[in-house]
Image: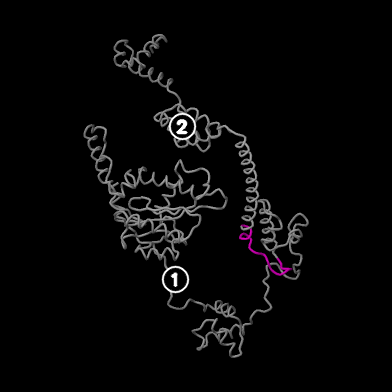
Amino acid sequence: MTTYSSELKDSILTKLLPPNNVGVPQLAAQTGIPRDTLYGWRREALGRARRPRASTVPAGTLGSEEKFAVVMETATLNELELGAYCRRKGLFAEQISAWRTTCQQANAPLTSTTERAERRAEQAEIVRLGRELQRKDRALAEAATLLVLQKSPGDLGGARGRSLAYERRVQVSEYIAQACAEGARLSRACAAVGLSERTLQRWRRDGAIGGDGRTREHRTEGAVRTPANRLSPHERQAVLTAANAPRFASLSPHQIVPALADEGCYLGSESTFYRVLRDAGQLARRGRAKAPTRVRPQPLEATGPNRVWSWDITYLASTVQGMFFYLYLIMDVYSRKIVGWEVYPQESAAHAASVLHKAYLREGVHPGTLVLHSDNGSPMKGATMLVMLQRLGVVPSFSRPAVSNDNPYSESLFNTVKGRPDFPSDPFDGVEAARRWMTTFTAWYNTIHLHSALKFVTPAQRHRGEDVDLLARRDALYQAARDDNPTRWSGPTRNWTPPASVLLNPGKPPREQEKADTNMT
């Protein structure tokens, strides 16, 4: 194996690497060194010179120091350099702009004594509100814990002296201990399950839950006690005979018992009749009524704008914990355009009807041409909303109960709304603040956002019918690029054909269609 000196190797690398960039075949012919050796030297030198890739950290995990460092690093960058920096660091330009504004506001000097006094007053108010919020948080946590406690073991209320099994006592004691550990007071936790504090203390007297001391010694374990007021076989037969008598054969126990009472005869209550008939196997369903069946909604096909609309309501957090603003959002299924929206502090059918009426007039919809799809919420099925639909000639369509994917387009749009990088990280101060942000978002979404399901045209372009010519120009450009350099294309060009229609709840395709699609793939 031939050995080369380091001086020779360095001189060869000087010629191979930038800025000289002499070709490997040329140097091999001049020096007599094999090409594989030269390629290996150059690959090794380039590997040492290559810088390690910068690791990115999610913006949500950056601390104040890291954000300040990002602001300082980008202070002198122009727009192109800033875009490249954001892609390297995994950030958005909107986030850096917000951090820069925060730094500027934090370093703004107080110009007068009055402003400093106002600042101290604001800080004191913030401290007071923080304490009030902590108090309300504790009260809310206790209320939530007590609510869960009431639903978990059930109400144990009843007459004094009632007997509880040992397993039931252990279960209730554990529930109460868990509620107290989560912030509930002992008195409130005991009251939630219908017990007194003294009873719980008696259960825990010896450090462990004790059983009921009133267990009868003569009763064997597992024995079933026969109630003293149980009906005798003769009485049960009398109930069956009365219920099956010709004059009562078609009546229910609710009708039989009063009729017998009018005749001065009492055999038992309505529940007794039902229980005896059930035990005898004579309580089958009668009548023509059948159990209701649930049918999947018929597919809705949108072949143009203002044919099928979808709408829903989502929450927007406010600065008051437990209170929300409600975003009413109507979109066109064909173009994905937001045709109507509004933010209200309440959720009601009247607000929904108002938003629909404004969107209907703004879009110039003709009666009898529009279908409005929604889920089964109370604002969607309220009387005011249904009257408005009937007045405007809009056909309502509803999702199946508890099936969220029957209204997928509205759910996807809400994900886009709350997934924007400029969506406020803090709750909205008021309704007007939420409306201002939604105005900005709607303008961006309808006129700037390139929608992936629309072949990357904006919803407004699709709504106006401009997508056909735009996509045709894209297709022509791709065809020309392929003709200029066909070796770079292993197959047909990208499909820029706009979708002719959009289906809502299309259902499963027939098996023949599935096989055809598989074969085409």
Distance from the alpha carbon under mark 2 to that under mark 1 = 60 Å
What type is the residue that disc 2 sits on? Lys
Identify the residue under disc 2.
89
Q: List x then y, in percent, for residue 401.
A: 45, 61
Q: Which mark is residue 362?
A: none
Which residue corresponds to mark 1? Answer: 291
What's the magenta bit mostly, secondary-structure-wise? loop
Residue 89 location, x and y as percent?
46, 32
* Colouring mode (rainbow / by chain / secondary structure / one colour): one colour
Q: Disc 2 vs disc 1: which is toward the camera?
A: 2
Q: Is residue 134 above or below residue 22?
A: below
Q: Is residue 508 magenta?
A: no
Front position in the image: 297 or 75: 75
Residue 223's place in the image compared with 88, above or below, is below
- Magenta segment range? 148-163
Residue 158 counted in the magenta span: yes
Find residue 34 and report its image quarter: top left
Q: Residue at x 52, y 81 (%)?
A: 252
Tell me which residue sits at (63%, 81%) in the image.
231
Given the current orientation, which residue lies at the most extreme right position? Answer: 206
> Which amino acid type is marked by label 1?
Ala
Q: Is residue 63 left or right of residue 36?
A: right
